[in-house]
Amino acid sequence: MADRKLHYKTYTAPAGGWGAAAATAKVLLEQSVVTKGSRALLAMNQPGGFKCSSCAFPDASCTKTFEFCENGAKALAHEATKFRVTRDFFARHSVAELMAQSDYWLEMQGRLTEPMRYDAASDHYVPVSWDEAFATIGRHLRGLDSPHRAEFYTSGRTPNEAAFLYSIFVREYGTNNFPDCSNMCHEPTSRGLPPAIGVGKGTVILDDFDHAQAIFVIGQNPGTNSPRMMTCLVEARKRGVPIVAVNPMPERALIRFTEPQDIAQMATFGSTPIASEFVHVKIGGDLALLKGMMRVLFEREAAGEAVLDHAFIAEHSEGFEALRDDVMAQDWDEIVAVSGISEEQIRRCAEIYIASNATIICYGMGLTQHQKGSQLLQQVANLLLLKGNYGKPGAGISPIRGHSNVQGDRTVGIDERPSEAYLDRVREVFGFDPPRAHGHHTVESVEAMLAGEAKVFIGLGGNFVRAVPDTERAYAAMAKLDLTVGIATKLNRGHLVHGKEALILPVIARSERIETADGEQFVTIEDSMSNVTASRGVLDPASPDLLPEVEIVCRMAMATLPESRVDWVRYIDDYGAIRDKIAEVYPAIYEGFSERIKAPQGFHLDIAPRRRAWLTPNGKANFLILPGLHVDAPVDEADMLRLATVRSHDQFNTTIYSYNDRYRGVRGGRMVLFVNAEDRAARGLEAGATVALETIASDGIARRVEGLTLIDYPMPRGAIAGYYPELNPLLPLDYYDRTSGCPAAKSIPVRIAV
Ligand SMILES: Nc1nc2c(c(=O)[nH]1)N[C@H]1C(S)=C(S)[C@@H](COP(=O)(O)OP(=O)(O)OC[C@H]3O[C@@H](n4cnc5c(=O)[nH]c(N)nc54)[C@H](O)[C@@H]3O)O[C@H]1N2
Ligand SMILES: Nc1nc2c(c(=O)[nH]1)N[C@H]1C(S)=C(S)[C@@H](COP(=O)(O)OP(=O)(O)OC[C@H]3O[C@@H](n4cnc5c(=O)[nH]c(N)nc54)[C@H](O)[C@@H]3O)O[C@H]1N2
Ligand SMILES: [Mo]
């Protein structure tokens, strides 16, 4: 059904500014946490306080007084909310009734308060003791004929200490089945970059933004998804640094932004233009654009100029000639046709790149979520290598991660394809033999459920069933399981689409204090720029019956592995002891963890390319080739549109804060499609028409979403956008990047049906 209250009006004001300030006040009011929330906001991202859970962009708490971020405030308000989901709530609503409610409604019910178990006879969740809950998990896991029949999901809010212990527990149990939210997100970074530059992480730190001479922001919407990054962009722009934004959607904050911290700007309703060059690329057109830019560099060299860093290339890299041959084989007509960008503008972008001696390229889901996402990132790495943009101030590659600790979780062992060296360390440190066979990533875990091979699903945070592709099939997959466990702060759809038995285990949130028998504990997280910091909650837990994630992991392990070699009892109370073990397993990067974490602003993990050291098999940075210009398989159907599923300004992944998307001018609904007016008219449709969308796929499965309102929007021809997770039913499970396993959620081939 179409949204009845839907309203659309082009947004012309700058992003940020008073709109952001007003939205912050409103959300604190809505969640009834004005005083408590404001107090907590002051502790957020400050030394001695806790880390914002809304994104992984580093905070500048050490240099700036108060970083204001509207979406950080929303995340906090929703966590500190006064609303509660109690046993009475579950007694009032059957699971079938709850299933009929929207994701927004579920979120608005508030914080979970005590462990619950699913009672099939009444179709209600009923209270269960913690002891009984852990006994249930232990019984199921011990009862499986193979440990590979269990899937252990992690979402990236989980702190290092809990994630590390989880990775040890699951490996001692006997499997590497670690589907992770990262598998749907920056896995192309983790898998694509190591063969190129030796690490699967960014090479930039926050300071570099002060030294950059050019910044590219590709496939990323920082004004909404990493608002703290806007401070860096505003400051760079004020210094006259060119900023090139590459996006099929002219995201408002990339065009004009008012810094809510800038009192003068706020008072005068001023704003800063952000992008000096807005590149309105087609969906999936980035490879052609990158090759076009590289082509300009090679053409200039062929004409006798020296625009490349030849010394760097000679000393540090391999594969240069092969890259040049590949790039020069693409002709301009095709580059322009596939990217949707004129040769003239591509040349301007290349000139900006050539003129800069220190360039940062940032990117997000617009690059990773394609069928060849991993290899596409290697082309980003190539462009940077050509001018030696690694290991000098102001330069490097900067994947902007999503969840606040998604990078940290992977660093400390959440990895379905662990290295031999790591497994050897685990054996030495903990004295058990970890399994060597690779486990399931997210898509493979759903496939295992569909095939009836998987029996148990444990979700350490997140909302798996709403985040994964192919919603209907995912629901069916979960229903086949014997046991599903959701370890969470808030009620979500994942708790309602459950196995034969099901548990909801509520946790202490990031903003809340953790007290154990040993006293107050803190946790640590690693941000998108490899900075590790402490996080200490300041609020009282939402209920006395919550447990910290660390304790939940330890007690699951104790219930499952009575003969365990690991001192779980100790780790429940002493988080310092966990950090000591992290240091033992990862001496190269975490040596002296407990001491180093005492620094108020934390410490940086070593990033080898910053030293121009290359942890690749040949010890060099490698130019890698991706032939052709397409990152998604071309589809031979005249009616085809490429669908990008994106986030609105008022959601955090599957958590919906409201039905508005301020900067895109949408109010009162999420069932919308942003479409180019000519594409709409070519189909004989009026603006505001309600349509259905169908996936074009050859697997014989019909995928359709109804009730979508067409909004005329400056999209390139052939491109269409709508919201995640509402459009996940259109994303086929096997439509993913084969190198990383990441679903291609930004380039689903679809057709409009009426
Ligand atoms: N408030 C808030 N903050 C968040 C999140 C949230 O949901 N809400 N989610 C967190 C998480 S887990 C993540 S991963 C990040 C996500 O942050 P982003 O990466 O910014 O996320 P998206 O909104 O999915 O899409 C990014 C952009 O890609 C563009 N795009 C789509 N297709 C293409 C393409 O083919 N090429 C190019 N160049 N661009 C394209 C879209 O128009 C959009 O502007 O944010 C994190 N922070
Ligand atoms: N079509 C499409 N699909 C996508 C994407 C897309 O762009 N398009 N993006 C993908 C990306 S980038 C990601 S990262 C995934 C996100 O996938 P997930 O990480 O699985 O999803 P979230 O919505 O972030 O999870 C929200 C839930 O986490 C729980 N939670 C919140 N805080 C905490 C905490 O501190 N501890 C614990 N234990 N639980 C907590 C709450 O109960 C909340 O309901 O989705 C992916 N799916
Ligand atoms: Mo993400």
Image (cartoon, rainbow, N blue to C red):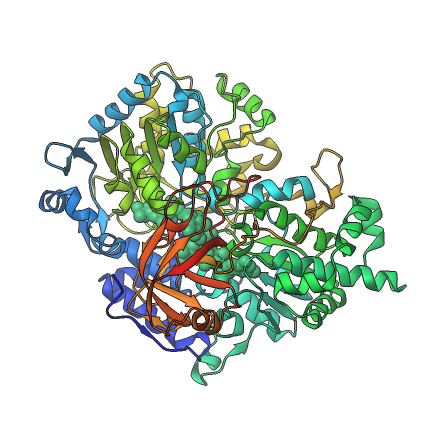
Residue 62 in sight here: no
Q: How many marks?
A: 0
Residue 219 image point, x, y percent:
54, 59
Q: Please identify the residue farthest to the top as the structure is shown.
A: 563
Q: Is residue 381 visible?
A: yes
How far from the left and from the top, in percent, is residue 406?
Answer: 47, 44
Depth check: 130 or 598 in front? 130
The residue positioned farthest toward the bottom in the image shown: 268
Q: Position of residue 224 (x, y in %)?
A: 44, 63
Quadrant of the image containing the C terminus = bottom left
> As drawn, which residue projects farthest toward the right?
304
Residue 666 locus on image (x, y percent): 35, 71
What residue is rendered at 62% in x and 34% in y? Answer: 588
In the figure, is residue 337 to the left or right of 681?
right
Q: In front: 125, or 608?
A: 125
Q: Determine which quarter of the picture holds residue 280.
A: bottom right
Lateral position of residue 51 relative to residue 218, left or right: left
Q: Residue at x 72, y 69 (%)?
A: 347
Task: State left or right for residue 611 relative to residue 254.
Answer: right
- The correct choice, above or below, for 110 with respect to 170 in the image is below
- Quarter containing the N terminus: bottom left
Against 430, is 357 above or below? below
